Image (cartoon, rainbow, N blue to C red):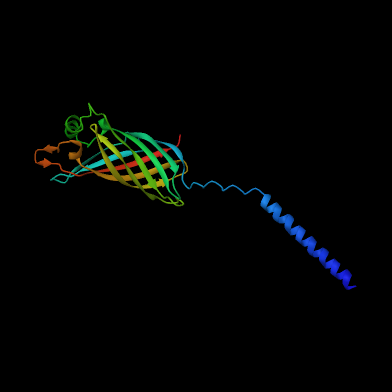
């Protein structure tokens, strides 16, 4: 009786070992599932800056309170791609129609175009650069660092903007601010009677970039 019990026990042990070995072999032979691509919390690839919905405003200080001007003739492209970790990067190229800049006063506008910006020779102001951000879930506006080359009157200078960006389903809305010195671009300080302008000029952009 003991011999039969021992034989039965050995058979059970051997069967269990065989089943375990088979399961281990199958697990080792099974293909490893591919790591899923990172889900993007923000829209990617190419977006066109929308004229009319985008704008540039500048504020010039002077000894009598200062003045400002603006234009909504802004165009260009934004290309957004994933970067390292949870970061994203964008390439930006923007063009401002300098001939459309206005301060609301005809005489001052004529002087700005003819003398200070020389828009007959340099009709556009351009910016090319990059933006870097970590938007997280992008459920609310997030900060971005924008750096690049701002070209005014054919003079290029490195410029940094502070920006906040809102990501929507197929577009971005961004507000960015930088300070620019007229002296860096060879622009003489505007003077009129007792009004004398000075540096720095505050430049504010509202950019709407939409997927085609």
The one of 49 and 13 positioned closer to us in this rendering: 13
Q: Residue furthest bottom?
A: 2
Tell me residue 180's x, y (percent). 23, 42
> Residue 153, located in which quarter of the rendered image?
top left
Query: Taking the image as drawn, is residue 132 in sight?
Result: yes
Q: Residue furthest left?
A: 194
- Number of callouts: 0
Q: Residue furthest top?
A: 120
Which residue sits at x=77%, y=58%? Answer: 18
Query: Taking the image as drawn, is residue 49 in sight?
Result: no
Which residue sits at x=34%, y=39%? Answer: 129
Tell me residue 193's x, y (percent). 9, 38
The one of 10 and 144 positioned closer to us in this rendering: 10
The one of 42 and 105 positioned closer to us in this rendering: 42
Which residue sits at x=18%, y=31%? Answer: 110
Q: Is residue 88 left or right of residue 157?
A: right
Q: Is residue 104 left or right of residue 63?
A: right
Tell me residue 74's x, y (percent). 33, 35
Tell me residue 78's x, y (percent). 40, 38
Looking at the figure, which quarter contains the N terminus? bottom right
Q: Is residue 51 above or below residue 161?
A: above
Q: Is residue 59 above or below residue 9?
A: above
Q: Is residue 90 left or right of residue 31?
A: left
Q: Residue furthest front?
A: 3
Looking at the figure, which quarter contains the C terminus? top left
């Amino acid at each position: 009786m003991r011999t039969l019990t021992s034989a039965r026990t050995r058979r059970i042990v051997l069967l269990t070992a065989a089943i375990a070995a088979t399961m281990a072999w199958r697990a080792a032979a099974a293909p490893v599932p591919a790591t899923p691509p990172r889900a993007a919390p923000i829209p990617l690839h190419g977006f066109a800056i929308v004229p009319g919905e985008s704008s540039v405003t500048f504020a010039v200080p002077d000894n009598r309170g200062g003045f400002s001007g603006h234009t909504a003739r802004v165009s260009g492209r934004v290309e957004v791609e994933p970067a390292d970790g949870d970061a994203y990067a964008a390439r930006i190229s923007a063009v401002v129609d300098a001939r459309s800049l206005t301060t609301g006063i005809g005489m001052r506008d004529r002087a700005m175009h003819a003398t200070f910006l020389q828009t007959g020779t340099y009709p556009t102001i351009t910016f090319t650069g990059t933006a870097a951000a970590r938007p997280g879930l992008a459920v609310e506006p997030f900060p971005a660092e924008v750096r690049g080359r701002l070209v005014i009157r054919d003079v290029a200078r490195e410029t940094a903007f502070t920006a906040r960006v809102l990501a929507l389903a197929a577009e971005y809305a961004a507000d960015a601010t930088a300070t620019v010195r007229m002296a860096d671009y060879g622009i003489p300080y505007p003077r009129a009677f007792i009004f004398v302008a000075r540096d720095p000029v505050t430049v504010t952009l509202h950019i709407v970039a939409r997927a085609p």
